[in-house]
Amino acid sequence: MRIQRRFDSVSAAKTWDRKPESRSGDRDLLPDIFGKDTFGLNEMQSRLPENVFNRLVRTIRHGKQLDSDIADTVAAAMKDWALSMGATHYTHWFQPLTGHTAEKHDSFLKVGADARAITEFGGEELVQGEPDASSFPSGGLRATFEARGYTAWDPTSPAFIMGGESATYLCIPTAFSSWTGESLDAKIPLLRSMDALDRVTRRALKLFGIDAGMVTASLGPEQEFFLVDREFYYRRPDLMTSGRTLFGAKPPRGQELDDHYFGQIHERVLACIQSIEMDLYRLGVPMKTRHNEVAPGQYEMAPVYENANVASDHQQLMMRILERSARSYGFICLLHEKPFAGINGSGKHLNWSFGTSERNLMDPGDTPHDNLMFLFFCTAVMSAVEQHQDLLLASVSSAGNDHRLGANEAPPSIISVFLGSQLEDIFNQLEESGKAEKREHDGLLGLGVNVLPDLTRHSGDRNRTSPFAFTGNKFEFRAVGSSANISLPATVLNTIVAEAIDNWTELLEPIVEAGTTIEDALWTLLANEIPSFKRIIFNGDNYATEWVEEAARRGLHNAGSAVDALVALGSPRNEELFDKYGVMTPRELGARLEVLTEQYFIKINIEGETAAHMARCMILPAAVTYLKQLTSTRNETKQAGGSTKGLESNIMRVSGLIDEFNDALDELDTQNEELGGDEMSTKVVHMHDNVIPAMNAVREVADRLEKVIPDDLWPLPTYRDMLFVR
């Protein structure tokens, strides 16, 4: 006997058994558990000789060359700590060009000639590993038969313990390169870009009489995601293979009531998120906020921003913990940018800044109109964004993010900058007169009730529609997709800003050396440069059609899809940029273009094949079964002498939909078989121009069928179930 689909909702609602928290005391001991599963500075200091610890700190905090002769000592201490934490294995944890992390586990156990077992882990094992590089995406940097690759210990990102019911092991963050020394990962270009930003910014700071040591880029990614009950996930082949629903009619209720955003977090979801936070605290991830997002079933978690390299590692850990812990509560975490059509998609807003250990160079202070250092660096960022709109867009482009960028939500695929009224006014003053003075933009906000306090009004409003917004003391790159590795957009940001700072420093140095004060030289420079990037400043509604038209008049870059955007990675101008600052060679940059393009092709190909299978093997049989039921009922009713007018109408409707569905499905099969030629550049065009429209045509008919086929015959969990069952 077939189990009716509607009972799945009841089953799903019961899958979570409330159970005592395994770490119930952790919530009262947050300072004690933070970083407990990491081999951080405190643990190092307690286990390492003072001179070894100090030499290691020089590398971690000041960017000095690592002293290789301390590796054995560090390895021994790290091994002892890992064993005390229950670890049996270690792995060099790295980030290949898959967008995910990779690891190969080696046991601490060694068997000697006398057959006695010992634990062993030395400096050589710590510093260098050798995973097989042949099966990772390399974009042509490695051939399949050329297998050798190396992992190199990154001492600036702390080693950590991954623990679970089945295994506990030590993870050592590492960089991943080929035998030829070319980067095969996300970490190496990020670290190189941070070095480039450090070099040029230190040089610029000397113009202001400042020598404050190492300059570090900082990141704080806000992670959006959906939680759906696993009962539904495993009944949806599209979610399992592509991460998004390829079929699904819009439910009567979605996010229209605006009641989910910042609403009370459901008990089961809260328990899940609390568990995730505890695991992340133990791994040293400084989680700060959690809340319901716009769409039902959608949530956001965000850390305090930190060193860009560590933040990138932590972001990968966060996605992994989200997916792992969600299952413990009967959920599946969906990180796709658009799991549900017609429902708010998920991004990963990337808060970015840079500065020294003593000052954030993106902090305007109380008087931004005369904070010359802030105006210099903020203007350099603006110039960089204007000059490299194409690169910024390419860095966040993917098959998944195409569903967000330029759609009816999230930032459009037009890169513009929101400054807020105060900063925009300052830049306007500088352009007009070469000087700026304070004007009233802030103050106290009275609420008209004595018992409520007066609030401090910020100098500028926020703009949640802007792809690149200034938010008080940092820029928020809002166009990043929820499933993305943040290293690439961060690498691009660091590099383009390094170039802008470098160029302006080149202009200012001879002027200052000739006797002009830095203040006078800078006022003149700012007044001259502001017109060159003013076109990207936009404080209005980025979602509006009028802005798209206005942006076109301004000549702003607007690539319609990832297929169009990614080609920027192959332009000679951008190759020269990354090569000049030692971030990526033309071959390394070209490899990223090839890998990202191939990933686009593969993902759409998977979606096309999955959609065709679901349509023909699940949806079409349900429609035919319903038609058969209608026809049988019509015949029985006619024999009994009853009216069949309504039945005839429904038979015609369903029969017509089946014909439409079959025609659309035949076209999808044809496009799936035609892969677009032998070159990847033509394959992705075929996917974008032919396969995606064919999938959409099949879906359009399927979603109409969903609205007429009885609940117990429809083979897929509906949006209503997936979005609202908790």
Image (tube, rainbow, N blue to C red):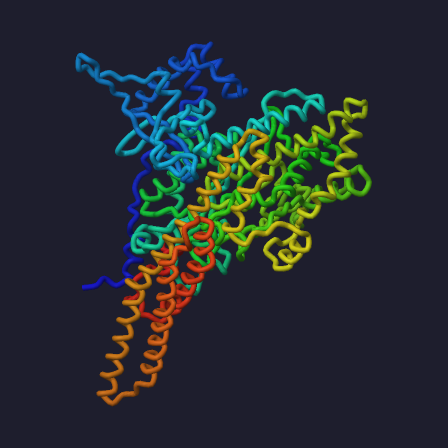
Residue 541: x %, y % from top left: 62, 54
Q: Is residue 592 above or below residue 70?
A: below
Q: Is residue 223 left or right of residue 362?
A: left
The percent position of residue 710, horizontal first and vertical second, equals 31, 70
Residue 634's place in the image compared with 524, above or below, is below
Specify the farthest residue to the front.
678
Q: Residue at x 76, y 34 (%)?
A: 525
Furthest residue in direction bottom, as rendered: 641
Q: Quadrant of the N terminus?
A: bottom left
- Residue 591 location, x and y as percent? 46, 38
Foreground of the two, 266 or 111: 111
> Could you tell whether 69 is left or right of 425 in the image?
left
Residue 329 sits in quarter: top left
Image position, residue 266 (x, y; %): 40, 49
Residue at (24, 83) in percent of width and height = 635
Asked which quadrant contains residue 572, the reply is top right
Q: Nearer the viewer, residue 66 or 424?
A: 66
Q: How many marks?
A: 0
Question: Can the viewer see residue 430 in this picture?
Answer: yes
Report the residue at 52% width, 46% height from top: 566
* Residue sitting nearer the eye, 608 or 674: 674
Asked if one can make out residue 300 in the rendered structure from this viewpoint, the answer is no
Left or right: 647 with respect to 385? Answer: left
- Is 639 situated above or below 336? below
